[in-house]
Image (cartoon, rainbow, N blue to C red):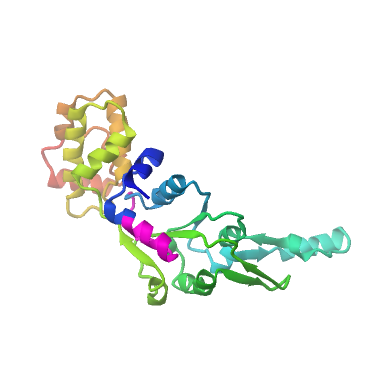
Amino acid sequence: MKSSQLETNQSYIASEDLLDAVNIAVTLEKPLLVKGEPGTGKTMLAHAVADAMGKKLIIWNIKSTTKAQDGLYTYDVVQRLYDSQFGGEVTDIASYIHYGKLGEAFLEEEQVILLIDEIDKADLEFPNDLLWEMDQMEFYVQETHQLVKAKHRPIVIITSNAEKELPDAFLRRCIFHYIEFPDKEEMRKIIGAHFDNIDEELVEQAMKLFYKIRNVKGLTKKPSTSELIDWLRALIAGGIDPAYISSHAPYIGVILKKDRDIATMHKEMPYVH
């Protein structure tokens, strides 16, 4: 997969190291675990890979309550009980089996991209509970005595915000890549992918202040790439003079979302009014 494919198809700017990691994961048929702070494009990577490879993307959004079983299948025993009481005899148990995102990926006729998004939101046992299914590409449905085997091994991309450590046994089965926050050169490319004919001086002044703010010590949430893009849109919509940005930080609430962080910025940068 070439960098130009990702840039053209998804306006996604990927480093050569990241592209190498994707290619290695695909070649070795191992999940790609991508870590990085929020806003570094971890989730969008899966969209870009799916678009570049012309494959369907299945997204499994992980929550604190998510269990590994949810990704395989669930058995709607309540509906079956209701139907047996009010709808007559129930004979087709399979109709009460609902496949999760991993199950859907296994059953697809063509190879798909499976995104397991923010795996570190779940409890510590969640990754280990997926090991067998991820290794063997199969699982057993107890209620129907059916073995579900993947028709094609999906290309699995897993994201983590590094909020908690993942089990070693799980990590051994993954290809790992940490997405560093974009430097100024990379950020210019990202901005160029989102805007046509944007004022260069506006970009220069906005980026200058943006990176200064990111370097302020004590911020509880550093502004992300997506927030910089939103801020540029706000500055353009407001017709802000680039010379005004560094001293007044207009629309600061677009990039800093907490009162405490705004106060910290003003304390560390008193020249910003």
Where is residue 159 drawn, in percent x and y?
40, 58
Examine the rendering and report whether any part of residue 161 can be seen. no
Q: Tell me if residue 246 is in the magenta stretch.
A: no
Question: Residue 35, percent across and down?
Answer: 34, 60
What x and y, as percent, mark residue 263?
A: 21, 46
Q: Image check: 256 left or right of 93?
A: left
Q: Is residue 84 visible?
A: yes
Residue 28 covered by magenta stretch? yes
Between 71 and 254, the one lying in front of the other is 71
- Above/below status of 5 relative to 155: above
Q: Is residue 186 left or right of residue 230?
A: left
Residue at the outermost bottom position: 169
Where, by quadrant of the figure, is residue 201 drawn? top left
The outermost residue toward the top is 239
- The picture quadrant where one finds residue 161 is bottom left
Residue 70, by quadrant, is: bottom right
Specify start and end residues of the magenta stretch as a single range: 20-39
How many badges with numbers are in the image?
0
**What residue is shown at x 28% (from left), y 50% (from top)?**
15
Pick the residue in front: 32 or 214. 32
Residue drawn where x is 37% and y is 65% of the image = 175
Q: Which residue is depicted at the point 75% across and 63% down? A: 94
Residue at the farthest right position: 88
